[in-house]
């Protein structure tokens, strides 16, 4: 597998795990609004740092910054798909367990719904959630891939300063024997001379 592809897939998987964990905390806990905003920013920093690491590793291996950008873009694009989809899928897949939907906090408050479940199941609430999660996914993918590419390029530029060492060439396994400093074929020649008489 190509270095940039492997690194990009790894970054995308790691970024997705962080993003989906954030979505789970957002939906299924009573995290306060200020703390939620902090966690949202931390999620972004950590996720795009993975894109930078993918670029760094690719840059070390390939010595090409553009390949690092490709790795970062792939990582960002993967998360740009999985995170918005998880916002919708987790909310409606486990609607009874949802405690809040902070992604649409102001819409929920202004809706006058008696509970977050009532908001999610209402036609207006459902349309809003669908539009801001699934509906915005294409835009989020482009934005995440672009920022991921920038981080990957930066990481690759740094990584090129520390290239991977080339693998040592393999040689046949030869057991080293201590030598006395004399020609190793000399004892053999003496035996051969003695045998001839």
Image (tube, rainbow, N blue to C red):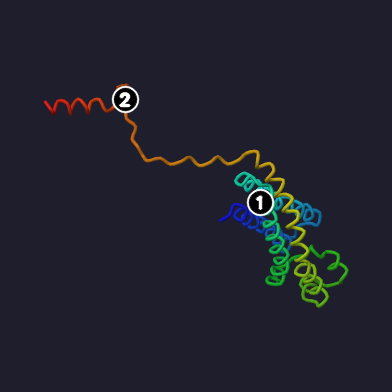
Depth check: 194 or 36 in front? 194
Name the residue rendered at 77%, 56% in the picture.
Answer: 36
21 with respect to 125 (left or right): left
Depth check: 34 or 194 in front? 194
Depth check: 184 or 9 in front? 184
Badge 1 crowding class, 10 Å Cα cut-off, few under 14, some 14 to 19, many 20 or more, is many
The disc label shown at residue 37, or none: none
Hey, which residue is sitting farthest top in the picture? 181
Say if 97 sits above or below 194 in the image: below
Secondary-structure class at tag 2:
loop
Name the residue rendered at 77%, 59% in the picture.
Answer: 143
The image shows residue 48 at horizontal and vertical percentages of 71, 52
Badge 2 crowding class, 10 Å Cα cut-off, few under 14, some 14 to 19, many 20 or more, is few
123 with respect to 17 (left or right): right
Q: For the residues marked 1 and 2, what is the alpha-carbon distance in whole angstroms?
A: 51 Å
The image shows residue 39 at horizontal and vertical percentages of 75, 53
Say if 101 sits above or below 3 in the image: below
185 with respect to 109 (left or right): left
The disc label shown at residue 67, or none: 1
Q: Which residue corresponds to mark 2?
A: 179
- CB under 8 Å between callouts 1 and 2? no
Hey, which residue is sitting farthest front in the picture? 196
Number of marks in the rendered image: 2
Secondary-structure class at tag 1:
helix
Name the residue rendered at 65%, 38% in the picture.
Answer: 161
Hey, which residue is sitting farthest left in the picture? 197
Q: Quadrant of residue 197?
A: top left
Depth check: 71 or 15 in front? 71
Say if 175 sits above or below 61 in the image: above
The image shows residue 99 at horizontal and vertical percentages of 74, 65
Q: Earlier in the sequence, mark 1 or mark 2?
A: 1
């Amino acid at each position: 597998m190509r270095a940039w592809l492997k690194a990009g897939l790894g970054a995308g998987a790691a970024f997705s795990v962080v993003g989906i964990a954030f979505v789970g905390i957002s939906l299924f806990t009573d995290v306060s609004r200020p703390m939620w905003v902090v966690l949202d920013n931390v999620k972004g920093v950590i996720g795009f740092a993975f894109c930078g690491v993918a670029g760094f590793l690719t840059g070390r291996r390939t010595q090409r910054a553009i390949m690092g950008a490709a790795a970062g873009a792939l990582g960002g694009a993967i998360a740009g798909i999985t995170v918005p989809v998880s916002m919708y899928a987790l909310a409606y897949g486990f609607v009874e367990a949802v405690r809040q939907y902070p992604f649409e906090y102001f819409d929920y408050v202004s809706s006058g719904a008696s509970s977050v479940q009532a908001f999610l199941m209402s036609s207006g609430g459902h349309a809003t959630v669908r539009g801001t999660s699934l509906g915005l996914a294409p835009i989020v993918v482009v934005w995440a891939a672009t920022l991921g590419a920038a981080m990957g390029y930066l990481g690759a530029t740094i990584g090129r300063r520390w290239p991977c060492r080339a693998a040592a060439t393999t040689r046949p396994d030869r057991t080293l024997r201590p030598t006395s400093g004399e020609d190793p074929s000399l004892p053999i020649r003496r035996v051969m001379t003695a045998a001839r008489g």
